[in-house]
Every structure is written in C-alpha cells, then in structure tokens.
Image: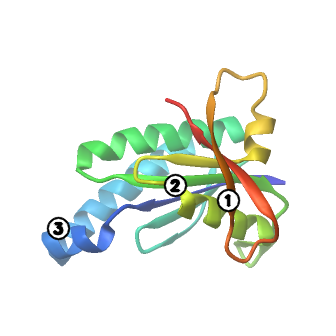
Amino acid sequence: MTTLLLTDIVGSTEHAEQLGDARWRALLNQHRAIIRREVAEREGAEVETTGDGFLARFDSPARALECARVVRDDVKRLGIEIRAGIHTGECELQGGKLSGIAVHIAARVQAAANPGQIFVSATVKDLAIGSAIRFEDRGEHSLKGVPGEWRLYSLVG
C-alpha cells in the first residue's frame, strides 16, 4: 500500500517552444530540483520522471498532499504551473518501477485536474480524515480504462 503523487507541467510544449531547448532544459531541471527537495523532505521516494512529469511515492497521504501543495506554490515562481493527482492503493515493485492499477488510477486523477489543481481520489480524502486538510468535492468522473465512476476532490489551500 502506497500513496502516489503524479505531477506534470501545464503547457509544457508551449513553454519549450517559447524558451528554446537550452532554456527549457534549465527550467525543467529547476522544476525537478524543487520536486526532489520536497519529496525528500517528506520522506517520499522518486519513482520516475517522464518528460515534464514526475511520479513519487509516500507512506502517508498527508505527506504526499503537503508535498504537492508546496511544489505547486514553489514552481509558480518559475513561471510555470503544474497539475497533480494523488491516489493510495496497492502497487507492485518490479525492477525498481511501480506497477498495478493504482498507478493508472493516480495518472487518471492527475489528468482530470486543471492547471494549479491538486486532485485526489476518495481513498486519499478518506485516509486524511482527522487531519486539518480540507477538500472540495469535484464530482463523479470516468477515469479512462478504469471501471466505474470515481469521486474526485481537490485540495483546498
């Protein structure tokens, strides 16, 4: 059981085109440094990066939520926005990579978020009960390739 955080940069292709390869690469490295710092500070682990996307795992939903919030706010200073998705579920570790339906669900939750939003599954919301963390209901969503309807929430604050 692990909590997964997926992020990606909103409008990355447009940013890359405007900045050119060298400046885009420098911005991407700054972005990754922020995420890596915040993941480490909250005892998470980097799983992988894909282009402008980032996947990390945490033992605690609260740590993943706080990491996402700080990263979202910090990267704004770089002139970029992220969208993030968080889900908790069973995963398998194969050759250093995570696999399982939970990874796919986390990716679909992230894809449903708008720029600057942190979306979470109901599982994450339920596990955060009793904390000071607040959520706003974003309704039922169909997650591509995942059976059923999924209630999603956005992190408030």
Residue 74 appears left or right of 107: left
Does the CB distance between marks 3 and 1 fall below 8 Å? no
Tag 2 or tag 3, which sits nearer the N-term? Answer: 3
In which quarter of the view is residue 14 placed?
bottom left
Residue 34 appears left or right of 111: left
The residue under the point 35% across, 40% down is: 74
The residue pinned by badge 3 equals 23
Q: CA distance from mark 1 to mark 2?
A: 11 Å
Relative to 66, is 133 above or below?
A: above
- Along the line of sight, the residue nearer the viewer: 155 or 30: 155
Q: Residues within 10 Å of mark 1 (few under 14, many from 20)?
A: some
Residue 42 shows in the view: no
Q: CA distance from mark 3 to mark 2?
A: 27 Å
Q: Amino acid at mark 1?
A: His
Tag 2 or tag 1, which sits nearer the N-term? Answer: 2
**Where residue 56 appears, x then y in whole percent?**
61, 57
Q: Amino acid at mark 2?
A: Ala
Residue 146 shows in the view: yes
Q: Secondary structure at mark 2?
A: loop
The residue pinned by badge 1 equals 141
Tag 1 or tag 3, which sits nearer the N-term? Answer: 3
Q: Amino acid at mark 3?
A: Arg
Number of the front mark, 1 or 2: 1
Q: Residues within 10 Å of mark 3 (few under 14, many from 20)?
A: some
The residue pinned by badge 2 equals 113
- Along the line of sight, the residue nearer the viewer: 36 or 88: 88
Relative to 108, is 31 above or below?
A: above
Q: Secondary structure at mark 1?
A: strand
**Where residue 154 appears, x then y in whole percent?**
58, 42
